[in-house]
Amino acid sequence: MSISVFVSVLAVCLIVIGVSIYFIVKQLKLNRQRAERIQAGEQRLKEERAKRIESIQVIMQAIEQDEKLSWTEASIRVKNLLDQLSVDLSEHEHVQAIYAIEAGTQHIPTHDQWNELPLQARRKFRDEMEALEAKHIEQLRQAKTYLLAFKFE
């Protein structure tokens, strides 16, 4: 084997090694970026989860302190927050009342639709909500106590 062939083979091998190193470094960089994005996404999810848990606690603390917040509204909000957290407490005896109130008021219009209702229809729906709240008031208070102490891990 001549020196020129040897140098040519050596040059080709060095080029292959160089190209391989380039692609390995590039892939490692992409993997690091992907891991950082995943970690940032997980952190964002963790923060959103913490906000939802805090919202549940704030609603439960405010329920009998703020006269503008009714048990019906609190139940609907808390049930939706629990759904967003993928926590199903519908079978739990202390929290069933929240699910019962939410289910019992699904047919009642909200937001703009509520404002468009005639006064008589609003009164009818308010009476219905108050009757539902009165029926479940003790269980709702138990749910409040339970949810304030519940660990959402």
Image (spheres, rainbow, N blue to C red):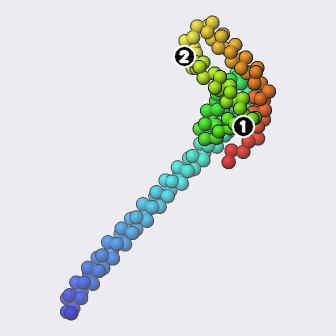
Query: Residue 62: x and y, percent?
Result: 73, 29
Classed neighbour count for the residue bearing mark 2: other residues with Cα under 10 Å, few (<14), some (14–19), many (≥20):
few
Q: Please rate how many residues cluster around mark 1, counting C-alpha atoms within 10 Å: few if below 14, some from 14 to 19, many from 20.
A: few
Q: Classify mark 2: helix, strand or loop.
A: helix
Q: Where is residue 77 in the image (x, y as percent from the top left)?
A: 64, 30
Q: Which residue is drawn at 46% across and 58% down?
A: 33
Does residue 33 sit above or below 88 in this rendering? below
Q: In this view, does 51 lie to the left or right of 18?
A: right
Seen in the picture, residue 26 relative to 153 is either above or below; the reply is: below
Disc marking residue 92 = 1
Q: Is residue 108 left or right of residue 1?
A: right
Closer to the N terminus: mark 1 or mark 2?
1
Report the amino acid beneath label 2: Gln
The quadrant holding residue 30 is: bottom left
Residue carrying label 2: 113
Instruction: Give above or below for 133 relative to 143.
Output: above
Question: Can residue 53 be seen from the camera position used here?
Answer: yes
**Residue 51 sits above or below residue 43 on the image:** above
The kind of residue on which mark 1 rests is His
Which of these two is toward me, 113 or 8? 113
Q: Position of residue 118 (x, y in %)?
A: 58, 7
Whole-angstrom CA distance, mark 1 to mark 2, is 32 Å
| Residue 109, horizontal then vertical, whole percent | 57, 18
